[in-house]
Amino acid sequence: MKLFAWLRRNSFVLLLLAVFICSDLAIAYWNPMVTSRRFYKNDFTKTLYHHQWTGHGPVFFGNSAVTGAYIEEQSRSGLIEMGLSYGKLTDLQAILDRQLFHVEQELVVGIDVHTMIDSLETDPTYQWFKPWYQPYVYTYRDYFRDSGTEFVKSLYKGVMDRKPDELFAYVPRWIDKELYPGQIAPDELEKKWDEYDKRFGWMTQQDYKDNLQAVDYMIRYAEEHQLKLRVIWMPWNKGYALPRYMPGLQEEVNRRLAAHHIPVLNLLQSYDARYFHDLVHLSREGGAPVFTKEVDAWLQSLAKS
């Protein structure tokens, strides 16, 4: 009886809670952050979109350095370009752990000077960052606010100006990944180098320990799933000094890879400044075609051997 009385006293609050939970579950099932062009799309969703939502296949994973450098449509390797803005190896681990994508046959991983920095901020909308218990609407509240504001403005304009076509009008959100045409001026690159050095130059192995563990995970995963694992050290603009932590990081990662006979292509300091858009991104016109051909030739040589 006490329980029944308590339920009666709080029936309105409980009803509101039930409505919110059911509504949030329905919105999560709809998943507009993926399915609706009204909402912002992260690079993982863009990868799926540009491959007809195919959730499996051979992959070239990395951060935006991979996106800028590897031209999938010009490559003969058949790899799906999965460069993620601010992507790290811990992101790859989360993707594989949660079975958000099933890598088949071959996993090529591009590591640049930022891929393994644990503290580097990334895109919070990546699917693996949402805790299971957190409401969908709350998780993506900023994007709901943005799209909701646009919806209200269109509705208002359609009603007040008597333009039915404007009632549900919206600007489709950008669905392509960022590429890197042309070259940034040297004085801007100097500023960028100074910024990188202040933010990351002092780092030690302690600052990329989580991503080192992700390297071990990646090796185990490839062995367990019989994947051909290959690692590429992505190019750095050698017109500028390499970040101070990079030699030690490269040595430690290569040691772990060598223990499992993982093939490595070291392009870290192989490309002249003329091939770069900035410090870490190859220019789409100059560097990316050269890089794509070199990667194809390397993978082909491994296949023959």
Image: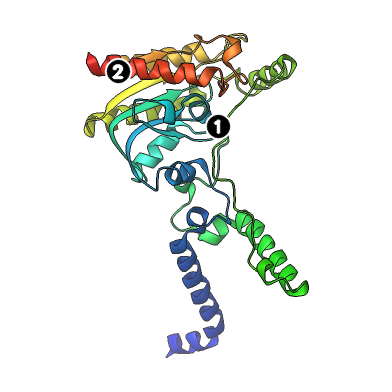
- Quarter of the image with the C terminus is top left
| Residue 186 as seen in the image, left or right of residue 59 | right
**Residue 35 at x, y percent in the picture:** 48, 56
Q: Quadrant of residue 119?
A: top right
Which residue has dot 1 on it? Answer: 119
**Residue 14 at x, y percent in the picture:** 51, 79
Q: How is the image coloured?
A: rainbow
Residue at figure coordinates x 59%, y 17% from the top left: 276
Label 1: how many Cα within 10 Å (few below 14, some 14–19, many 20+):
few
Q: Nearer the viewer, mark 1 or mark 2?
A: 2
Q: Is residue 70 above or below residue 91?
A: above
| Residue 274 as seen in the image, left or right of residue 50 | right
Residue 300, labelled with which disc? 2
Q: Amino acid at mark 2?
A: Gln
The reply to whether residue 224 is visible in this rendering is yes
Residue at figure coordinates x 69%, y 69% from the top left: 155
Query: For the residue labelled by badge 1, is the local secondary structure a helix, a strand or a loop?
Result: loop
Q: Is residue 170 above or below residue 108?
A: below
